[in-house]
Image: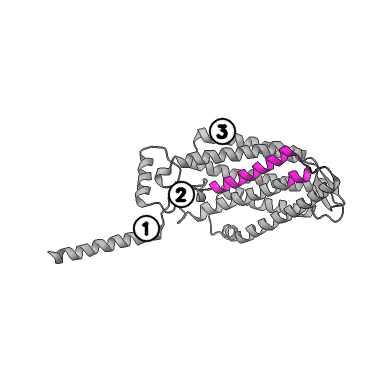
Amino acid sequence: MVNWTDPLTLELCGRAFQVMTSICFGIYLWEFLVSFWFDMEFFTGKRPFRWTFIVYFLTRYLILLGLIAGVRITNAFQRINCVVWNYLVYSCAHTCFACASLLLLLRVLAIGQWNRCITIPLGAFYLANVGTLVHTVAMTESKYVADLFLCGASNTVASRINVFTSFAFDLTCLITMLVLLMRERGLGIWKFLVQQGIVYFMVATALYLLSSIFLILNLNDAMNEIPQTASVTAMAICATRMHRHLLTTLQGDASRNYPDTMTLPSAGLSRKSSQALAARRLAGSPSVAYGVTIDVQVERRGDDRQDGLSMHKLHREPSSQ
């Protein structure tokens, strides 16, 4: 059986943590560069500003800063102030996580039509999660490991309450989102679950479940840090991708009527489904808060075909008589 406190094992785990940090930085750097066009649309004024963009940009750039600092502390070839650098890494990572969780929370609340029975409990749960993030940053400790040329966290068990709460929060949001979407299966929305953020919630929940398992086992500090680094990186990628997807798939900027909320695109819905949804809204029946959009080109092609058939019939009827 492996002795996880053996000096050789600790050294190997420290090396694994270095490799994981570099891998996460490389993956996120690629994600950042391939989606930078979206940022430029806001910087150049092509997209209107909304307050949710502040949360999006904080998520996107804080994780980048945190990973850069993480690469720095795992490649410290001379002694540095590990306490300050570790505070920087944890502050960026946990603030990024709070913003990413807020993006996902807004998604759920928008689907739930900002119902108080959903908004108040999830909002309180989110604030409690933010409190655990602040507690973890305050409790973090680090020391320089000369043999590995890195700054290693030495009190990772303090992250237990944060990771457990984050896992519970993501799982609650995932279940809530599934329940809300399942209520609308009759409108043809079920097949669009992949587009509506379910996959993003699943990835984040699965990774935080893995982090929770490692913290329960508490093998050593390096092993506790490895899944957490992957979790916060994946959380940032999932939350920002979901936000971009919601805005870029709303054709004709259909979300303009809801500038401070994220709406649910339902691309591909038929005109009858859209009319049925509008009728339900007028009747006051409960429905998901969509920003209903129709594929304009498909609809136009369909209308052109119908108009062409109608004109053909009109031309043929007199001749047949």
- Give residue 269's position: percent from left, percent from top: 40, 51
- Residue 16 visible to an observer of this rendering: yes
Mark 2 secondary-structure assignment? helix
Dot 2 or dot 3: first in sequence order is 3
Number of numbered discs on residues: 3
Give the residues drawn in magenta, as a range: 196-225
Mark 1 secondary-structure assignment? helix
**Residue behind mark 3:** 121
Dot 1 or dot 3: first in sequence order is 3
- Give residue 125's position: percent from left, percent from top: 61, 35
Instruction: Kindly identify the amino acid type of the residue bearing the numbered disc 1.
Output: Glu
Is 99 a magenta residue?
A: no
Which color mode does the image show? one colour
Q: Badge 3: how crowded within 10 Å, few (<14), some, or many (20+)?
A: few
Q: CA distance from mark 2 to mark 1?
A: 20 Å
The answer to whether 75 appears left or right of 52 in the picture is: right
Q: Residue at x 40, y 43 (%)?
A: 186
The answer to whether 144 appears left or right of 298 in the picture is: right
Image quarter of the N terminus:
top right
**Residue behind mark 2:** 191
Q: Residue at x 55, y 33 (%)?
A: 120
> Which residue is more in the foreground, 123 or 209?
209
Prevailing secondary structure class for the magenta stretch in the rendered image: helix
Q: Badge 2: how crowded within 10 Å, few (<14), some, or many (20+)?
A: few
Image quarter of the C terminus:
bottom left
Dot 2 or dot 1: first in sequence order is 2
**Residue behind mark 1:** 299
Q: Are marks 2 and 3 in contact (CB under 8 Å)?
A: no
Instruction: Kindly identify the amino acid type of the residue bearing the numbered disc 3.
Output: Pro
Q: CA distance from mark 2 to mark 3?
A: 28 Å
Q: Which quadrant of the structure image shows residue 282? A: top left
